[in-house]
């Protein structure tokens, strides 16, 4: 039985209803901007991640010929702070920002459940989009966003940082050249271990904030929830849910979407190429073993995914021990470890075949050089100077696998990807 056929209908119904709320006109795709044209940005979502991006964009204003002209957040205190950083206009409602004709691109760093809706509305308004990971909250949203990017022709960059590492792109070239033989599996992890969980420690609660407050303490709680768009259920004000949204399934996929998205996307570049690959089967397990507070997400999460091209990926994310699994790709001839540079080593009885592909050596290192960061890459792509590191197809393929893993964990089932119908099935 399909787990998303009914939810897809619901998603389409709610997005259609949301169209009556939205006031954004769809604009025709703009031409690629020239190197001498200033790119004007809006930043939507000005919490910790968004403020970091905002400061970075402001700092690179003169060198990259860009300007942040507007910001948006549902919390007035954050909005006021962001306006001061960029000396721009501020909006509590993102639709007001997207109405502006002088904005060319938006950077979206809201809670996960809003990523798709704002990205789609921005694309329809003729803006280029940089959206933080995870690309969306659900599979249905990922497919809809993918199709919107292809239809509008706008630039969209997703934000998993290691996709900008040249090591993963060089690793792909080496795999294509057969230097480690047929790839059969890969591994990676993103682990943390703090005395106070970082999902609590980094997201401080402002005790004076709330939807019933005025001035700097005001929070537009209904907009945060997005229940009018069908993005999350309507509920009473809960400060923990607002300030620490990553602990709750309504707004996040926990460590899987927050952390493992960073690791799976670059591994897919290395093995499958720039557009990634959709999984064939996904399973996940783990639990809430130590961090027992009001959270819903696990502190131990393990994901395994099989792919149609006959390789598997195993990934771990835990909040209880920060020892990492190395980024490794395993082939029949040898093993590749990927940090800042890929290191290739022959393996077992196939060392001679490995040597034949690696200049007669049983170990080889691939030299790499630095690349533009993801923001810079996005700016270059808008100007037609580069392709984005994490494009919409890679972003969607990664999101499908990660979300299938979240559903597998929550429902204690393995899921299969029906490629023909683009549905996950138990």
Image: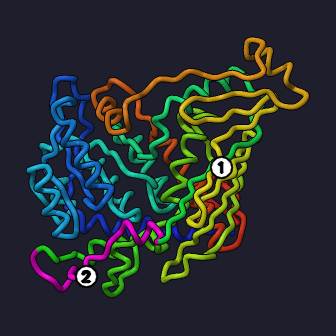
Q: How many marks?
A: 2
Mark 2 nearby-residue class (10 Å; few <14, some 14–19, many ≥20):
few
Residue lying at 79% horizontally and 17% vertically, measured from the top left: 355
Q: Is 210 inside the magenta-drawn segment?
A: yes
Residue where numbered disc 2 is placed: 207
Residue found farthest to the right: 349
Q: Is residue 257 left or right of residue 187?
A: left
Percent position of residue 58, x then y: 18, 42
Residue found farthest to the front: 195
Chief SS of the magenta region: loop
Name the disc covering residue 325, or none: 1
* Image: magenta residue range: 196-215
Mark 1 nearby-residue class (10 Å; few <14, some 14–19, many ≥20):
some
Percent position of residue 48, x then y: 31, 59
Q: Secondary structure at mark 1?
A: loop
Residue lying at 65% horizontally and 74% vertically, measured from the top left: 411
Image quarter where the N terminus lies is bottom right
Residue lying at 37% horizontally and 26% vertically, measured from the top left: 386
């Amino acid at each position: 039985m399909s787990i998303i056929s009914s939810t897809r209908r619901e998603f389409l119904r709610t997005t259609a209803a949301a169209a009556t709320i939205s006031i954004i006109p769809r604009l025709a795709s703009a031409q690629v901007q020239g190197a001498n044209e200033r790119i004007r940005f809006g930043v939507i979502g000005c919490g910790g991640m968004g403020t970091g991006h905002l400061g970075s964009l402001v700092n690179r204003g003169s060198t990259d010929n860009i300007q942040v002209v507007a910001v948006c957040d549902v919390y007035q205190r954050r909005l006021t702070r962001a306006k001061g950083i960029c000396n721009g206009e501020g909006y509590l409602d993102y639709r007001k920002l997207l109405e502006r004709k002088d904005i060319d691109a938006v950077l979206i760093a809201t809670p996960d459940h809003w990523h798709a809706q704002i990205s789609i509305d921005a694309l329809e308004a003729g803006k280029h989009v940089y959206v933080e990971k995870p690309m969306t909250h659900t599979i249905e949203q990922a497919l809809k966003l993918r199709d919107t990017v292809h239809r509008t022709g706008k630039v969209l960059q997703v934000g998993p940082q290691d996709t900008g590492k040249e090591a993963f792109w060089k690793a792909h070239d080496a795999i294509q050249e057969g230097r480690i033989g047929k790839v059969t599996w890969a591994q990676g992890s993103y682990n943390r271990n703090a005395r106070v969980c970082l999902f609590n420690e980094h997201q401080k609660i402002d005790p004076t904030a709330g939807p019933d407050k005025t001035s700097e303490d005001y929070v537009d709680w209904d907009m945060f929830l997005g229940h009018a768009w069908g993005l999350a259920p309507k509920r009473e004000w809960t400060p923990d849910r607002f300030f620490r949204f990553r602990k709750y399934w309504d707004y996040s996929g926990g460590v899987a979407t927050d952390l493992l998205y960073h690791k799976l996307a670059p591994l897919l570049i290395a093995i499958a190429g720039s557009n990634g690959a959709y999984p064939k089967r996904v399973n996940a397990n783990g639990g809430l073993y130590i961090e027992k507070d009001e959270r819903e997400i696990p502190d131990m999460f393990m994901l395994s995914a099989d792919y149609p091209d006959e390789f598997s990926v195993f990934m771990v994310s835990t909040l209880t021990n920060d020892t990492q699994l190395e980024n490794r790709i395993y082939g029949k001839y040898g093993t590749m470890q990927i940090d800042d540079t890929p290191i290739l080593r022959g393996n077992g009885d196939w060392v001679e075949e490995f040597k034949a592909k690696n200049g007669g050596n049983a170990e080889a290192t691939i030299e790499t050089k630095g690349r533009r960061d993801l923001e810079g890459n996005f700016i270059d792509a808008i100007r037609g100077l580069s392709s984005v590191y994490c494009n919409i197809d890679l972003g969607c393929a990664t999101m499908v696998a990660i979300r299938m893993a979240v559903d597998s964990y929550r429902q204690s089932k393995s899921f299969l990807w029906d490629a023909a119908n683009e549905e996950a099935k138990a």
